[in-house]
Amino acid sequence: MIRFDQHDFSISQTMCQMDLDSLDDNSFLEACATADTFLPNYDDAPKIIDRIIEAAQRGDPFSLVRIGDGEGNVLRLSSEFGAPPTSIDEKCFDAIFTMQNNTNFLGDTPGKVAFASLVARAVSNASLLGVRAVWSELPPESEFIRSTLQDGEIRGALGLLNARLFAERLIRHNSRPAGITFAHCYLALLDGLPRLLDNVPEILIICGRGSLRNTFQQRLGDRLVGFITVPVEGGGDPEEPMKSHYYRYFPRVLDRLSDSLSGTLVLVGAGIFGKVYCEAVRCAGGVAVDLGSGFDLLAGINSRPIHSGLNFTHLLS
């Protein structure tokens, strides 16, 4: 486990202060609203589902990608971020990578930058990008980042900040910004999951909850064209690093996604690696939806604080 000390905390406070002072939540919301599609509310889920269904039925490439603190930790190392990373940024990358891969990154800094750029490309090319700040049910993002840092959550605070800064650069400097929705849209999409599943030609699943395979098979029959099980975050250390998600599964999944996927809906729950899978699906002509920890909820596991009291296990019956 990567640990942060008081020295790291002091440096992080200094690093964050200028960027935090420059954040203007209202201005960011106004910029998001200029996107071709702006769907910031829970009640917008039917419109999101309509877009997904339409893309699958027409055979159009599409990806819905969501970013939060973990993605921000990775994006900070990408060349697309626009500023060189610090040693704390690299430490945050190591922390989130180790958390989600269940083992550390074996390569050097250029290898980390190369992976980060794959994630940056997935975010930049998303048809619909989920960002945290636009959902009115949450506290203002700038305030939340400050409180997260004050609580000593260095990785989380810097991840949230860097995800926001990346999204700001993308939205403000792109003449045709991606469609924008809220990062927690997967919760709303789960409510409409039966309609989504019933109205697309083919479905491929990529997630860490292998226990859902039979349930999806029974629900979808021959329309389920594949179920790829990847290691679940926090599922325990692999026998050796080379058998971890990134080193063993990542290249194999990307190879599977290199075939034509036109008309195929691919539901993805694979953390930071899942963003790259979504981009691979889009490039193969398919429709990718970053469902993330929604698969945990479908499996009856409340893995996030926001999952408290939620139950979606009945949706696949």
Image (tube, rainbow, N blue to C red):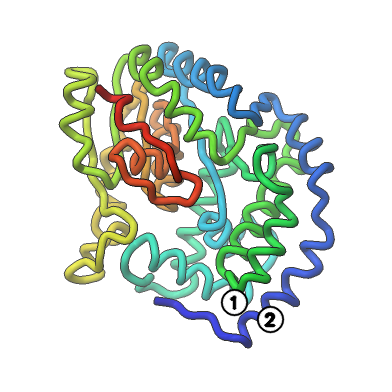
Q: CA distance from mark 2 to mark 1?
A: 8 Å
- Placement of 252 over or under 107, stated as above or below: above
Could you tell me which residue is drawn at 56 percent across and 85 percent down?
Answer: 5
Q: Are marks 2 and 1 in contact (CB under 8 Å)?
A: yes
Label 1: which secondary element:
helix
Judged left or right of residue 68, residue 54 is left
Q: Quadrant of residue 101?
A: bottom left
Judged left or right of residue 111, residue 120 is right
Disc tally is 2
Judged left or right of residue 157, residue 2 is left
The residue that mark 1 highlights is 88
Q: Quadrant of residue 7?
A: bottom right
Residue 224 makes an appearance in the image? yes
Residue 254 placed where, x, y %?
32, 44
Residue 150 placed where, x, y %?
68, 71
Residue 71 placed where, x, y %?
53, 54
Along the viewing direction, whichever of 10 and 298 lies nearer the viewer: 298
Residue farthest toward the front in the current orientation of the protein = 309
Along the viewing direction, whichever of 303 and 78 lies nearer the viewer: 303
Viewport quadrant of the C terminus:
top left
The residue that mark 2 highlights is 11
Could you tell me which residue is drawn at 61 percent across and 37 percent down?
Answer: 182
- Classify 10 Å Cα crowding around label 2: few (below 14), some (14-19), many (20 and above): few
Could you tell me which residue is drawn at 21 percent across and 63 percent down?
Answer: 243
Could you tell me which residue is drawn at 47 percent across and 28 percent down?
Answer: 189
Check disc 2 and give the amino acid type: Ile
